[in-house]
């Protein structure tokens, strides 16, 4: 749940009996993969999703950009060299959406925790007001 209690992330069982992560705002659910954390305003969700080969990958979701691999975001921002790292899960995100923590596997094959600090410009889509989400939910008949 975000700081105001207006945005909730979690997991629900779908019609086929599988767990499905979600982001809920004002009665509108957005399906994700496995949500593990949400920022203070509820505009950034982080978690774990399987890639095309079935391997877990840490993700960051915003309404604007949808689901993106944290590793891909870091490489695109040229923040660090990520050769050999596998970012398996994002477990938490800072209030402003710029810092993500998670776990993965380092180049030597050891499980490690990690901290990713994204440049501020990568978070411009996180400045949306949570009331916009509430209005969006009403527009959809909820």
Image (spheres, helix red, strand yellow):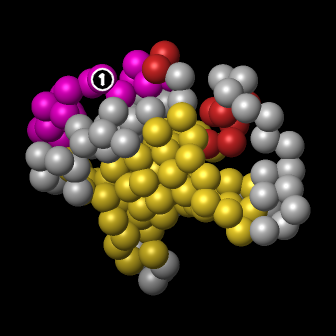
* Tag 1 residue: 127
As drawn, 69 above or below 48:
above
Taking the spot 71% from the left edge, 68% from the top edge, the residue there is 111
Residue 99's x, y, as percent? 46, 39
- In which image quadrant can residue 98 be found? top left
Toward the bottom, the furthest residue is 17
Taking the spot 13% from the left edge, 31% from the top edge, the residue there is 131
Quarter placement of the N terminus: bottom left
As drawn, 78 above or below 93:
above
- In which image quadrant can residue 35 be found? bottom left
Taking the spot 27% from the left edge, 24% from the top edge, the residue there is 128
Is residue 31 something that shows in the picture?
no
* Position of residue 14 in the picture relative to residue 137 (left or right): right
Taking the spot 51% from the left edge, 51% from the top edge, the residue there is 101
Residue 60's x, y, as percent? 51, 43
Highlighted range, magenta: 122-142
* Position of residue 7 in the picture relative to residue 105 (left or right): left
Is residue 18 something that shows in the picture?
yes
Q: Is 141 within the magenta?
A: yes
Residue 126's x, y, as percent? 35, 28
């Amino acid at each position: 749940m975000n700081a105001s209690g207006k945005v909730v992330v979690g997991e629900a069982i779908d019609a086929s009996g599988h767990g499905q992560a979600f982001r809920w705002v004002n009665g509108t659910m957005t399906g994700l993969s496995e949500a593990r954390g949400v920022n203070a305003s509820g505009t950034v969700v982080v978690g774990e999703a399987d890639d095309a080969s079935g391997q877990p990958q840490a993700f960051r979701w915003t309404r604007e950009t949808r689901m993106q691999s944290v590793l891909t975001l870091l490489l695109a921002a040229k923040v660090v060299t990520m050769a050999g790292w596998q970012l398996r899960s994002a477990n938490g995100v800072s209030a402003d959406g710029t810092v993500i923590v998670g776990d993965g596997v380092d180049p030597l094959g050891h499980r490690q925790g990690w901290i990713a600090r994204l440049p501020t410009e990568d978070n411009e889509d996180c400045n949306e007001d949570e009331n916009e989400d509430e209005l969006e939910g009403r527009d959809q008949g909820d």
